[in-house]
Image (cartoon, grey):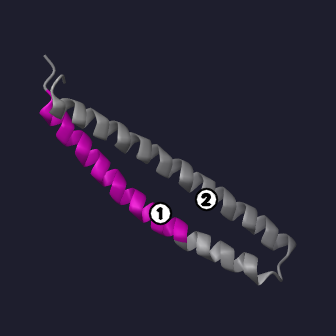
Amino acid sequence: MKTGEGVNIIVKGIVFLHNFEAFQKYILKTEAKILKLDQNIAEFPEDEELKRLKQGLRIHLSWVRKYFAKYKGVYLQFLKLSHQIFIVD
């Protein structure tokens, strides 16, 4: 752990964890925006701009979820590799 390589692995792990949590927060925030748009569309069903905005957010959220799934796979693989590098005495 005192080597530069050990410190580098720990820093990468911290960054991965930060981004992993940020993805989850962003997904929840975007889902809340979509729910709010649903409420607004119910109030103003003739507003096409709200419908387009909701559709755009759904497409964006789908892309983010796919990217998050890939990131999650990379994160889990990184943890497995990092765990194999360190042998606890």
Is residue 71 positioned above or below 84 on the image?
Answer: below
At which x and y percent is residue 9?
23, 36
Q: Label 1: how many residues lie within 10 Å, few (<14), some (14-19) or many (20+)?
A: some
For badge 2, the amino acid type reads Thr
Question: Hey, which residue is sitting farthest right in the picture?
Answer: 43
Question: Which secondary structure type mostly characterizes the magenta part of the structure?
Answer: helix
At which x and y percent is residue 88?
16, 21
The residue depicted at 60 percent of the width and 75 percent of the height is: 56
* Quadrant location, the N terminus: top left
The residue depicted at 35 percent of the width and 55 percent of the height is: 71
Is residue 30 positioned above or below 51 on the image?
Answer: above
Is residue 73 positioned above or below 61 on the image?
Answer: above
Write down the quadrant of residue 42 in the picture. Answer: bottom right
Q: What is the spatial separation of the Cα atoms under label 1 and label 2, in whole angstroms?
A: 10 Å
Query: Helix, strand or loop at disc 1?
Result: helix
Q: Is residue 24 left or right of residue 55?
A: left
Reading the image, the residue beneath label 1 is 64
At which x and y percent is residue 78?
24, 45
* Quadrant location, the C terminus: top left
The residue depicted at 35 percent of the width and 36 percent of the height is: 14
For badge 1, the amino acid type reads Val
Write down the quadrant of residue 16 in the picture. Answer: top left
Q: Which residues are magenta?
A: 60-86
At which x and y percent is residue 8?
23, 36
Question: Hey, which residue is sitting farthest top in the picture?
Answer: 89
The residue depicted at 82 percent of the width and 79 percent of the height is: 45
Reading the image, the residue beneath label 2 is 30
Query: Helix, strand or loop at disc 2?
Result: helix
Q: Are marks 1 and 2 in contact (CB under 8 Å)?
A: yes
